[in-house]
Image: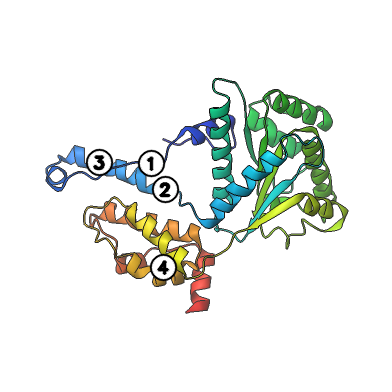
């Protein structure tokens, strides 16, 4: 069944509490003897498994987690000008995944240090497109489950209410995704930037942002942009070159497959081809392999071959990259 979005406290906590998916293949004799109904149930379990599969701990995920952890420690006793982190890179390069894994790791660490307390260690919001201070405040309010913001409410009052709740809940990590939606070339973008700065100054928390090529989007231009740049460390994500890490990524994803007729080593033998198909994008690679696995289950082949992968479309950006490199 559909799960709550991580943009709500309930959905976020479910995300943190959910362990990586686990599923064991049935022994061959038991699998072949399943009734039609039991086979359907079993296949549905494997479809659910492959629709999510695993989160691969890429070098970018490890670096974001390390830098985020370091900054939360540095900021622990800071009373002003807390340092932040920006995760920047092209689309489908794992920015949001890294951001959420940082948040999950931090929250689990806080729970271990402070068991049984009613804290909200992490808040995860997205920057609203064509946003305004009111819309930004509404994102925080929605995450916290506060009452809907009414038009007559003053924006500063809303911000104060949000800050009060987060301070009481001892929030110490705020994750702001889609920061490329913050356009400092517009008056609305400037107002939203000022409002975000208000949050950073009134909350004893580390702010971590993620967005598409944020430097090119003008996030660091002007006085406001220089303030952001002067307070944040940057971690860049990107397409993986065809090197050892890429080969390990393919091998890790292949080892996570739960197919009855798949020949191990098939995908590692196609790692160069998979790199060409996806442009080295981890997001595109994950989509391609998971879609191929689902197709293998639905069609009954139970294996992934090059011919099957050839017929699985990937995102348009990866297709364009493949045409350029061909």
What residue lies at 33% left-to-right and 69% top-to-bottom?
269
310 vs 202: above or below: below
What residue lies at 54% left-to-right and 20% top-to-bottom?
116
Marks 2 and 1 in Cβ contact (< 8 Å): yes
Rendering quarter of residue 253: bottom left
Foreground mark, 4 or 3, reads: 4
What residue lies at 46% left-to-right and 63% top-to-bottom?
245
Element under disc 4:
helix
Q: Earlier in the sequence, mark 3 or mark 1?
A: 1
- Residue bearing the label numbered 4: 274
- Residue bearing the label numbered 2: 54
In the rendered image, residue 283, in percent from the top left (x then y), is placed at 49, 57
Marks 2 and 3 in Cβ contact (< 8 Å): no
Q: CA distance from mark 3 to mark 1?
A: 15 Å
- Residue bearing the label numbered 3: 42
In the rendered image, residue 230, in percent from the top left (x then y), is placed at 80, 53
Q: CA distance from mark 4 to mark 3?
A: 29 Å
Farthest residue to the right: give it: 223
Q: Nearer the viewer, residue 157 or 152?
A: 157
Element under disc 1:
loop
Local crowd at mark 3 within 10 Å, few (<14), some, or many (≥20)?
Answer: some
In the rendered image, residue 114, in percent from the top left (x then y), is placed at 58, 24
Rendering quarter of residue 266: bottom left
Q: Position of 52 compared to 197: left or right?
A: left
Q: CA distance from mark 4 to mark 2?
A: 18 Å
Q: Earlier in the sequence, mark 2 or mark 3?
A: 3
Q: CA distance from mark 1 to mark 4?
A: 24 Å
In the rendered image, residue 206, in percent from the top left (x then y), is placed at 70, 40
Element under disc 3:
helix
Q: CA distance from mark 2 to mark 1?
A: 7 Å
- Residue bearing the label numbered 1: 21
């Amino acid at each position: 069944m559909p799960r709550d979005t991580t943009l709500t406290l309930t959905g976020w906590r479910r995300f943190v509490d959910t362990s990586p998916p686990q599923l064991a293949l049935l022994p061959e004799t038991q699998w072949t003897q399943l009734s039609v109904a039991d086979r359907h149930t079993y296949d549905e379990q494997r479809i659910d498994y492959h629709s999510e599969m695993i989160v691969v701990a890429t070098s970018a995920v490890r670096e974001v987690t390390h830098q985020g952890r370091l900054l939360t420690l540095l900021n622990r006793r800071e009373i002003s000008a807390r340092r932040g982190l920006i995760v920047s890179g092209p689309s489908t390069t794992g920015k949001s995944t890294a951001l959420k894994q940082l948040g999950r790791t931090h929250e689990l660490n806080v729970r271990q240090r402070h068991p049984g307390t009613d804290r909200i260690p992490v808040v995860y919001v997205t920057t609203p497109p064509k946003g305004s201070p009111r819309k930004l405040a509404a994102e925080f309010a929605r995450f916290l489950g506060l009452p809907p913001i009414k038009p007559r409410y003053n924006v500063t009052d809303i911000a104060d209410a949000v800050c009060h709740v987060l301070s009481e809940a001892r929030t110490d990590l705020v994750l702001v995704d889609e920061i490329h939606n913050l356009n400092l070339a517009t008056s609305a973008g400037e107002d939203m930037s000022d409002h975000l700065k208000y949050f950073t100054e009134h909350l004893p928390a580390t702010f971590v942002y993620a967005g598409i090529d944020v430097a090119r989007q003008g996030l660091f231009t002007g006085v406001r942009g220089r303030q952001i740049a002067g307070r944040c460390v940057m971690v860049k994500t990107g397409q993986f070159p065809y090197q050892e890490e890429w080969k390990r990524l393919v091998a890790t994803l292949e080892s996570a497959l739960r197919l009855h007729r798949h020949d191990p080593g098939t995908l590692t033998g196609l790692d160069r081809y998979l790199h060409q198909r996806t442009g080295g994008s981890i997001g595109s690679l994950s989509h391609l392999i998971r879609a191929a696995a689902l197709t293998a289950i639905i069609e009954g082949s139970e294996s992934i071959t090059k011919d099957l992968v050839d017929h699985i479309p990937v995102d348009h950006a990866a297709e364009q990259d493949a045409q350029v490199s061909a």
